[in-house]
Image (cartoon, rainbow, N blue to C red):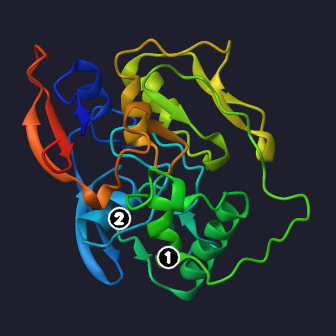
Amino acid sequence: MLRVLFSKSASRAVRQAGAPRHFRTSAVARNEVEVFVDGKPVKVEAGSAVIQACEKAGVHIPRFCYHERLSVAGNCRMCLVEVEKSPKPVASCAFPVMPGMKIKTDTNLVKKAREGVMEFLLANHPLDCPICDQGGECDLQDQSVRYGSDRGRFSEVVGKRAVEDKELGPLIKTTMTRCIHCTRCVRFANEVAGFQDLGTSGRGNDMQIGTYIEKTMNSEMSGNLADVCPVGALLAKPYTFNARPWELKNTESIDVLDALGSNIRVDSRGVE
């Protein structure tokens, strides 16, 4: 059994999407500003996001919607940090750095904010971990253990939100009740794959992700949606119920069928 993950880093679309995300509004010379992350001074390029400054300082910031190769959405609110003189925590993925900015990532206020965000995300998330192919490599699992509470306060009699599954093509298996509305898949489809039909409908608790006219995705890059999804809402259909992540051996390789020679990772189990 083989599972192949493609990285089209050599293509023009991914190179454009992979460019660093900055808030710079003019093509001026690159300047660096000094900020302080938990008291540690670090220099970053002017216009960078706070989350990039934290990463450069070696501080991990939890995130779901943020991806370094996609545009900034700022809708999951998991990356909240405290900035001096700010009245409330800010989304570090969408907040630009400023000279002398003092950023705090481990205060009680930040911990409570992240715990509250995680509680809302889990309020409607089904307990599918034992049967979910994302189990073992799921960002929601990892971050709920590290940043979540030991109990939830939501106990709706009507149960959790139910969403109809979508048909997105031969490579993607959907379980949309697990979706946390990070919109990574939508931004990847629009900005990298060039597939404009994938989007959102509704708002709030009624928001759903799918194609506008209920058609399947014909893009050759649709399989990458399973890679950018941080939960088990979008999974690789050929890999469904074949193996668990901890059973696989990772091997770096090159796609011999691709004229660009793209880098790939082959996940294999045993001699299959």
Mark 2 crowdedness (10 Å alpha carbons): few <14, some 14-19, many ≥20: few
Relative to 155, say whether 32 is above or below: above
Whether residue 217 is visible, yes or no, is yes
Query: Where residue 89 sits: x, y (%)?
Result: 58, 70
Relative to 241, say whether 158 is above or below: below
Q: Amino acid at mark 1?
A: Val
Q: Which quadrant of the rendered structure holds the N terminus?
A: top left
Mark 1 crowdedness (10 Å alpha carbons): few <14, some 14-19, many ≥20: few
Residue at coordinates 32% horizontally, 30% vertically from top-left?
17
Residue at coordinates 90% horizontally, 58% vertically from top-left?
158
Residue at coordinates 33% horizontally, 67% vertically from top-left?
54
Q: Mark 2 falls on what kind of element?
A: loop
Residue mark closest to the camera, 2 vs 1: 1
Q: Amino acid at mark 2?
A: Pro
Q: Which quadrant of the rendered structure holds the C terminus?
A: top left
Q: Viewed as shown, does residue 36 lie left or right of 194?
A: left
Q: According to the image, label 1 marks what residue?
A: 145
Rendered image: mark on residue 132:
none
